[in-house]
Image: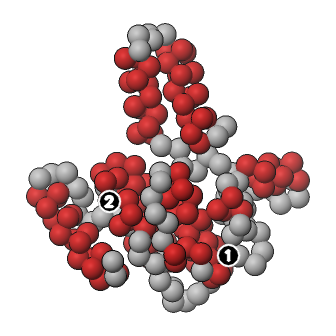
Amino acid sequence: MQSQEIGRYLAELGAALQSQGIMPKTIQTMAWAYQQICAGEDPWTALGNFRNAWYDYARHIRAALVSEPLGKPEPDTEHTRHWAAFCAASVEFLCDRYEVPCPDWVYEPCYTLSTPWYGDNIINLADTVVLQHRIKATPPPFARRNVFCGNRLFQNKYEMYEWVQEARFKGMSNPREIWRYARQKETALHGA
């Protein structure tokens, strides 16, 4: 599908689902999240909104959520390049994790940083223990793009809820036992 066709499809689907009270007015695609980041939105807010779409209300159209390329921001800054690389890595990571066809745009060289980036969180770059942990724990789609962020970014609260319910269905009632069961499921899928 071309970008315009996808946009029309998402608009029509969104209107139909919104009329039923199922979807928000705007479907938060990765391209839209990135546009919001470039416009000054807090990156974690924009990406959190995308995650709500990916994991919940638009999970049935995941391929459409990531099919549109990010676009080139004006102005092109270090901040926008960092977050473009992060967004491209996120798409590759999520597509692999949830068996969604990965769009070709994520492999463009412009989404690979020339120098390592450890995120906007304030960390002491002289603390080699922290840096080595980030490097070691970062999933390959991020590391290949020189984005070192660790492996806990895409924990899914919806999956955790389902695993807790699954544990209860299996007859578990001890909260510690339920948490351990759900955590084992999470670790098996997402790593430690």
Q: Where is residue 38 in the image (x, y as percent from the top left)?
A: 50, 77
11 displayed left or right of 155: left
The residue positioned farthest toward the left in the image shown: 19
How are the residues colored?
secondary structure
Label 2, on which residue? 61
56 displayed left or right of 147: left
Q: Position of residue 64 (x, y in %)?
A: 35, 67
| Residue shown at the point (55%, 73%) measured from the top left | 106
Whether residue 59 is situated above or below residue 87 in the rendered picture: above
Label 1, on which residue? 112
* Residue sitting nearer the eye, 63 or 40: 63
Quarter holding the N terminus is: bottom left
Badge 2: how crowded within 10 Å, few (<14), some, or many (20+)?
A: some
Q: Secondary structure beneath disc 2?
A: helix
| Residue shown at the point (52%, 77%) measured from the top left | 105
Residue 113 makes an appearance in the image = yes
Q: Where is residue 163 in the image (x, y as percent from the top left)?
A: 44, 28
Answer with the quarter of the image where residue 162 lies: top left
- Amino acid identity at mark 1: Thr
Q: Earlier in the sequence, mark 2 or mark 1?
A: 2
Quarter holding the C terminus is: top right
Residue 85: mark: none
Residue 48 makes an appearance in the image = no
Q: Do the residues labelled 2 and 1 touch (CB within 8 Å)?
A: no
Badge 1: how crowded within 10 Å, few (<14), some, or many (20+)?
A: many
Q: Secondary structure beneath disc 1?
A: loop
Q: Position of residue 51 (x, y in %)?
A: 43, 54
| Residue shown at the point (44%, 37%) measured from the top left | 159
Mark 2 → mark 1, Cα distance in angstroms: 27 Å
- Amino acid identity at mark 2: Ile
| Residue shown at the point (70%, 54%) measured from the top left | 138
Q: Which of marks 2 and 1 is in front?
A: 2
